[in-house]
Amino acid sequence: QVRLEESGGGLVQAGGSLRLSCSASGRTYAMGWFRQAPGKEREFVCGVVQSTGGTDYADSVRGRFTVTGDYAKTTVYLQMDSLKPEDTAVYYCAVVSEYATLLVPTSRDGYDYWGQGTQVTVSL
């Protein structure tokens, strides 16, 4: 069992920035971020393969969000810039711990453990 601790959510005006972090208590092969807005499905945002630094992003955030991983600390960071009201959601950290991967999973089924989520609200 791997426990995840997320931090960094909050309220920001449109055009502003926030940085989320997620620390895992055990081994991770990849770490990702998903988000879920009210009334919508949880969707993939971005992720990173810890050993290679390889990343993948949803088209909606590409160029605005940056994900980085600290392999030694089993921590992942999500730098969110140029935030828009449509980025408002609960953001969830997820990790791949049970199998080795060189690609970032983009589906929920690809991840083994999940954090509790942190609220990000972007106002006009």
Image (tube, grey):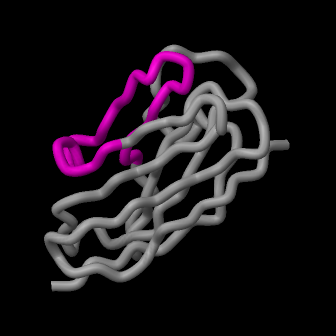
Q: Is residue 63 magenta?
A: yes
Give the side of residue 75 with respect to residue 43, left or right: right
Q: Is residue 28 above or below residue 88?
A: above
* Residue 4, horizontal then vertical, whole percent: 70, 53
Quadrant containing the N terminus in the rendered view: top right
Residue drawn 23% across and 84% down?
123
Q: Is residue 112 magenta?
A: no
Q: Is residue 89 above or below residue 121?
A: above
Among the 4 quarters of the image, the one containing residue 120: bottom left
* Residue 95, horizontal then vertical, whole percent: 62, 39
Give the side of residue 69 with respect to residue 79, left or right: right
* Residue 36, horizontal then vertical, whole percent: 43, 64
Of the pair 40 and 27, the residue shown nearer to us: 27
The span picked out in magenta is 44-66
Residue that protrudes farthest toward the front in the picture = 72
Residue that protrudes farthest toward the right in the picture = 1
Among the 4 quarters of the image, the one containing residue 40: bottom left
Give the side of residue 86 with respect to residue 115, left or right: left
Quadrant containing the C terminus in the rendered view: bottom left
Residue drawn 55% across and 37% down?
31
Residue drawn 59% across and 46% down?
94
Q: Is residue 87 above or below residue 97?
A: below
Q: Is residue 28 above or below residue 116?
A: above
* Residue 79, horizontal then vertical, whole percent: 34, 53
Residue 116: in sight, yes or no?
yes
Give the side of residue 60 with respect to residue 56, left or right: left
Residue drawn 41% across and 51% down?
78
Residue 39: in sight, yes or no?
no
